[in-house]
Image (spheres, rainbow, N blue to C red):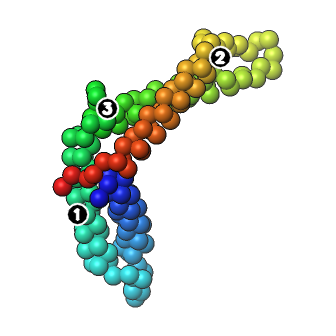
Amino acid sequence: MRLAEALVLRADCQRKVAQLKQRLGRVIKVQEGDQPSEPPAELLQELKHTLDELAVWVKKINKTNSLSPFNADLTLSEALAERERIMQHRNILNELLNEASIKQERYGRQEVKFYTTIEISALQKDVDELSKQYRELDFRIQEKNWSTDLLE
């Protein structure tokens, strides 16, 4: 099995856990005299089974990521950490860019005037460059996921 396939199965388990949580929330309490639409005990058992399955996938994926080379310098885990760093940096700069771009309306000369303390065009170039780096790295990671065998 390829790593990419295991990632899909892990995502399926995560979705199923979220759905089971919602379903349990709907049946955990009922009005006196009513019956729950689904048996809570069965849902709890299914939740336990799904969480156990999820843990198996997470362990295999983490093992594979930590032991598989991404390139000559990095493991797949290290490449994932670098992708996360790029994404966080880009998101923070993008939020700053959005905040700096908000116009403050002044209705009189007595109101406080605000100035942007950063160069918006330079910040936008940084955001664009980080977005490009993220896309390129993410593409290479996805490519590696489809060429890497899942370790048991």
Q: Could you say whether the residue bearing mark 1 is in a helix, strand or loop?
A: helix
Position above or below: 36 against 126:
below
Position above or below: 38 against 144:
below
How many C-alpha atoms fall within 10 Å of the one at disc 3: few (<14), some, or many (≥20)?
few
- 111 left or right, relative to 31: right
Pointer 2 residue: 121
User: Which numbered disc flags the more N-terminal residue, 1 or 2?
Assistant: 1
Quarter residue 30 falls in: bottom left
* Residue type beneath disc 2: Ser
> Residues under labels 3 and 1: Cα distance?
32 Å
Front one among 108 and 78: 78
* Residue type beneath disc 3: Asn
Quarter residue 126 falls in: top right
Tell me where residue 146 appears, x and y as whole percent.
37, 50
User: Which numbered disc flags the more N-terminal residue, 3 or 1?
Assistant: 1
Quarter of the picture holding the C terminus: bottom left
Q: Residue pushed farthest left?
A: 152
Tell me where residue 99 appears, x and y as whole percent.
61, 25
> Residues under labels 1 and 2: Cα distance?
49 Å
Q: Residue at x 25, y 41 (%)?
A: 68
* Residue type beneath disc 1: Asp
How many C-alpha atoms fall within 10 Å of the one at disc 1: few (<14), some, or many (≥20)?
few
Pointer 3 residue: 71
> Residues under labels 3 and 2: Cα distance?
34 Å
Position above or below: 66 against 26:
above
Tell me where residue 120 appears, x and y as whole percent.
64, 17
- 136 left or right, relative to 43: right
- 34 left or right, relative to 101: left
Tell me where residue 108 appears, x and y as whole percent.
81, 16
Quarter of the picture holding the N terminus: bottom left
Pointer 1 residue: 52
How many C-alpha atoms fall within 10 Å of the one at disc 2: few (<14), some, or many (≥20)?
few
